[in-house]
Image (tube, coloured by chain):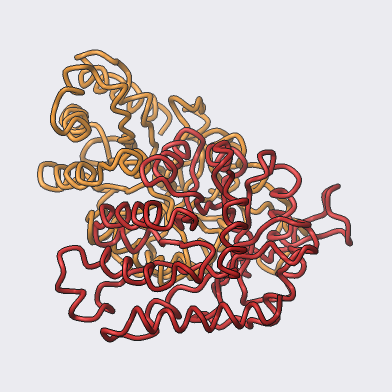
Chain colours: A orange, B red
Amino acid sequence: MGFLDRVQAAMEKNNSLLCVGLDPSPERFPASIQAMEKPIFEFNKAIIDATADLVCSYKPQAAYYHACGAEDQLAMTIDYIRTQYPDIPVILDSKRGDIGSTASQYAIEAFERYQADAVTVNPYMGIDTIEPFSSYADKGTVVLCRTSNPGAAAIQNLLVQQDSSVENGNTAMLYEVIARMCKEQWNGNNNILLVVGATNPTELKRIREITGDMTFLVPGLGAQGGDVEATVKNGLNSEGKGIIVNSSRGIIYASGGDDFAEAARNAAVKLRDQVNLYR
Amino acid sequence: MGFLDRVQAAMEKNNSLLCVGLDPSPERFPASIQAMEKPIFEFNKAIIDATADLVCSYKPQAAYYHACGAEDQLAMTIDYIRTQYPDIPVILDSKRGDIGSTASQYAIEAFERYQADAVTVNPYMGIDTIEPFSSYADKGTVVLCRTSNPGAAAIQNLLVQQDSSVENGNTAMLYEVIARMCKEQWNGNNNILLVVGATNPTELKRIREITGDMTFLVPGLGAQGGDVEATVKNGLNSEGKGIIVNSSRGIIYASGGDDFAEAARNAAVKLRDQVNLYR
């Protein structure tokens, strides 16, 4: 079963569009966890056990593991999800991108070393940096399109001159061009997704228009402040599907105390239900 | 001493603009190296010992270490250069890029965990994904501008509508816009460099016009087939400086036999001298 089918099955099983981001900052863990031999894994394990019936996917953020040399705990975390909750796919958020021969190494990292089900990638270097990932037909390749950070617009909203594929007017923003490439040129294996931030619902709507029923990974709710109603209404495709709503810090750090897992569960229930209100 | 000054000093000491890329594929090592306990480190060490008087920098490519879980050997490699050849700076080629809080983690990875002297970063997400790196004033931040891979043009050569900062005509290519942002907006610490492929010397010349005396990391000679004379003549700034010429596979795999280090030295001498012919 391919990645998109697996996500869809998890969405239905748990009645949830929620993805929980696993961005571990050990200094934010309760002291009891910090004292453990594998604190990152233990923290993640507690979060996963508390939320696995509430989510459609998990998304570990590679940077947090690389910063402190915890690749082993990243592998343990993904392996734990795969063995204990095999219905829940894992998106490795590492935003890779490089020339083809190097991108192939990053694909091996994501899909063979860590056995992730999907990976985030950066489109700036073009199709030959995407294909080494998307050629794994059963895996998901999640391309950055319109990201949620404040500086994104200065690049992603640059006005690009018309090419034959742009319908409305003679220009399109760069993120629209990327969305269209993903839809029309890069999606031969039907396993491309797009990262579309929740911080600008109008742009989310525009990308939905361009890409039809493609699936979006939508960060920016929670800690980054996106609007749930506008995000869900503008993001869903015509079948009422097609968005994976990510929250990381807003859930995993809902409490800094020993009740962090319970607090994470409560925050996940709340966001899941908020999202479902507008489906 | 900042990164650019350190590179310049190494260029002068070794009379070389050459950077050797350390992209280890263990299956390409001679059997005698493959049999060792830390084959990647041993391979790199032999290459480094054979070339350290011929280069201005080394550039380990992170993907090759991540693919096989060899972060320890990446750290050992950089540490070996730092301790044995402290005059030669190290560029970690990992093409990172993410929202600010995450980019900070990647900066910790590059500059604190590995103690690299510079890191490559992707500009697609904008200035707040660059600043966490460039705020390390003594380190180099090497921004992808015009890359050497075949698919790059479809994105990087998109025609962007004029904004007030573009002089010639009413459009500029995306890579020109990125070059101008690097020059005019992102270089407050004077530690930004640009990745500019050798595969299109005309574009190299254009980026030189836009960026004045900034320094470029130029991949694409050797295995990727760029033209040495055109690259050097179009790349140098008005002071006859400003390019770091990278070759990876063309040097480190010059021979697949037990003479690989000697062959790498010969290939490095040859490319260094070819480059120097046109300085």
Q: Vertically, is A29 above or below A153?
A: above
In the image, B53 versus B132, the foreground residue is: B53
Residue A214 picture location, percent across and down:
45, 54
Q: Residue placed at 16% from the left, 34% from the top? A: A38
Q: Vertically, is A249 above or below B121?
A: above
Q: Most extreme residue toward the left, as rendered?
A: A84
**Left or right: where A32 falls relative to B255:** left
Q: Residue placed at 33% from the left, 58% from the top? A: B77
Which quadrant of the structure image shows residue B210? bottom right
In the image, A1 versus B207, the foreground residue is: B207
Q: Residue placed at 54% from the left, 65% from the top? A: A126
In the image, A81 versus B103, the foreground residue is: B103
Camera sees residue B198: yes
Residue A136 picture location, percent across and down:
31, 67
Residue B134 picture location, percent across and down:
58, 41
Q: Quadrant of the N terminus of chain A?
A: bottom left
Residue A184 picture location, percent across and down:
53, 66
In the image, A7 versus A143, the foreground residue is: A143
Q: Vertically, is A72 above or below B59?
A: above
Q: Residue placed at 56% from the left, 60% from the top? A: B10
Camera sees residue A213: no
Q: Vertically, is A35 above or below B276?
A: above
The number of numbered badges drawn on the structure is 0
Which quadrant of the structure image shows residue A279? top left
